[in-house]
Each structure stands twice: as C-alpha cells, then as structure tokens.
Amino acid sequence: MDDLWYSEYDTPNVRFSIKVNAQLHSEQSDYQKIAVYDSPEFGRFLTLDGVLMLTERDEFIYHEMITHVPMAVGPDTKRVLLIGGGDGGAARELGKYPDIERIDVVEIDQRVVAVCKQYLPRTACGFDNPKVRLHFNDGLRFVRSAEEEYDLIIVDSTDPSGPGEVLFTKEFYGNCLKALRRNGIMVNQHESPFYGEDAKAMKAAHKRIVSVFPLARVYQAHIPTYPSGQWLFGFASKGPHPLKDLDAARWNALGIPTRYYNTNLHRGSFYLANYIEEALSENE
Ligand code: SAM
C-alpha cells in the first residue's frame, strides 16, 4: 500500500507533509472540520479546517511558552481567561500554579474539546483541573461583558480566518484591556514572520495591539510543525514589562517542571531578528 501523508500548504509553493499511519477521526462541527491523525514521527495530531494545530510530540513548546512567560512576569496572577485553547494544553500548564484561583476557558466549539478528550488526553487532561471553568462561547462576545476581572488573558486561538478572525480585531483587544485588572497581561498567539500570509497577519495583529495597550512586545519560539518553524507570541500589558519585571528567582523557586521554558530562554525569546523588528516597527 502507498504511504499516507498529511500535507499543509505554507504558501502555494511550499508544502509541509507528515507521514501518517492512520486518520483516527474526522467530522464537520458547526464551526470547522476537525480531524485527528496518528503519525510515526509526531504521534497524534489535531487539525482544524486542514490546518495543523498541535502534535503530541511538540505541543509542549507552544503551551509552555504561551503560559509560563506571562506567569513569570505577573507575580499575583489569580484569575486567568483562556480564549480558545480547546485542546486543554494551555490549561494543563496553568494548572501547575497553586496560587491561580480560577481559569475561565472560553472555547467556541465544544466538539474540539470532546475530540481532544477522546484522542489527545495528554493535553485534554488540562480540563480535569477543578479550577477550570469551561464556557462554550465566542471569545469576543464573552469578553465584552468582563470588566477588570482578570490578571491574565491568553488568546490561544486559531489563525485570523473562520471563527478565529474576530480574535484579531481592535474591538477584541479593546475589550481585553477593559477585562484586565490593574497590571494585567494579555498574551496571544501572534502568527509568524516568515511566509507572506502569516507575516501579514502578524503585522496586522501587532498594529492593533499597539494601538490599544500601553506596552506591547513580541517573543518567539521554535515549533517544528508550524509554518517555517518560527512562531511568535504577543505580550501586551497595562504595566508589567516582560524583561524588567521578570522575577526569575521567584519563578525558579516554584519548581515548575518544563521541557522548553526556562527564565534564560524567556529573556532570549524577546530578542528578535532585524527583519522581524523592522516588520513590527512598521506599525508602531
Ligand atoms: N493550542 C493549539 C496550538 O498549539 O496552536 C491550537 C489552539 S486551539 C486548538 C484553537 C481554538 O480556538 C480552537 O479550538 C477553536 O475552536 C478556538 N476558537 C476559534 N475561534 C474562536 C472564538 N471566536 N472564540 C473562542 N474560541 C475560538
């Protein structure tokens, strides 16, 4: 039998493919096509509308970087709003902090949560935490009614197309600013600087965040299964600076187990290549 491959077009001229043992699941939810595959190299992986979301082998990188960077800066984070995150990975990492009192997860598609609970227990275990309150709702609509309620907002969304599009708007970022307490932090998956479409989305998101938040920085991580392998995150806040206010000693004293994040890498991740700084400064 011929080999089976999952392929994703990063551009019309560049294709990323993973050899697949089998497709384990496929369905059309009210919002998107949800599929799970099993692969020899990356283990199981989830795709939404044909776009790779996470693999068992490298999801730790993304989920550690989208949570531990802000948690190492905001010392008194008690209430977290996690928008998207239907796979549970970010909730799993937040569950490592005993001082967090509540994690509101706002995921628009309950079928994503159900499929991840069935096929991806290593990330979906994040929902087992009693501090997690799962809301099946549109993140834009949910955050409209929040006022100075959260210390940290994490936007763990799909790309700015389909249901995720509204999570890259100025209105959404303005609502997040309003929903944050004093010294609040917002972190978002901020696309990528290399390929055209991703870089366009990165610049557009950065321009809107800069126009709303008093402080907005960008940091990076190497994620093998994401387009070009280089992925960015946005760090915006009402006050805290991601480097000046990093309390490495306090974070290290927590003894939180990680495989990618550490407080030296935290610092390094905010130093970006010239071409990325130039692209970001176009909109500052
Ligand atoms: N954590 C994974 C990663 O490594 O990138 C993927 C993120 S998670 C699977 C993205 C989630 O955002 C999806 O489950 C999707 O249903 C959800 N989502 C998209 N638009 C949304 C919206 N407007 N409100 C809430 N959740 C949304």
Image (cartoon, grey):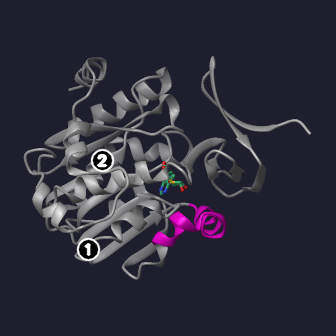
Q: Residue at x 78, y 51 (%)?
A: 22
- Residue 119 in magenta? yes
Is 254 displayed left or right of 18 in the figure? left
Residue count near mark 1 (Cα–Cα under 10 Å), binned few <14, some 14–19, many ≥20: some
SS at circle 2: helix
Is 112 displayed left or right of 19 in the figure? left
Q: Nearer the viewer, mark 2 or mark 1?
A: 1
Hey, which residue is sitting farthest right in the picture?
1
The residue wearing badge 2 is: 173
Q: CA distance from mark 2 to mark 1?
A: 23 Å
Which sits in the foreground, 262 or 171? 262
The residue wearing badge 1 is: 100
Q: Residue at x 48, y 22 (%)?
A: 195
- Residue 83 in magenta? no
Q: Residue at x 41, y 54 (%)?
A: 63
Residue 141 sits above or below residue 159 on the image? below
Q: On residue 59, which mark appears? A: none
First in sequence: mark 2 or mark 1?
1
Chief SS of the magenta region:
helix
Residue 135 sits above or below residue 179 on the image? below
Q: Amino acid at mark 2?
A: Tyr
State which region is magenta.
Answer: 109-126
- Residue 231, given in percent of the width and then of the height, sits at 41, 36
Q: Amino acid at mark 1?
A: Ile
Q: Residue at x 25, y 24 (%)?
A: 283
Mark 2 in CB contact with mark 1 (< 8 angstroms): no
Quadrant showing the N terminus: top right
- Residue 265, given in percent of the width and then of the height, sits at 25, 43
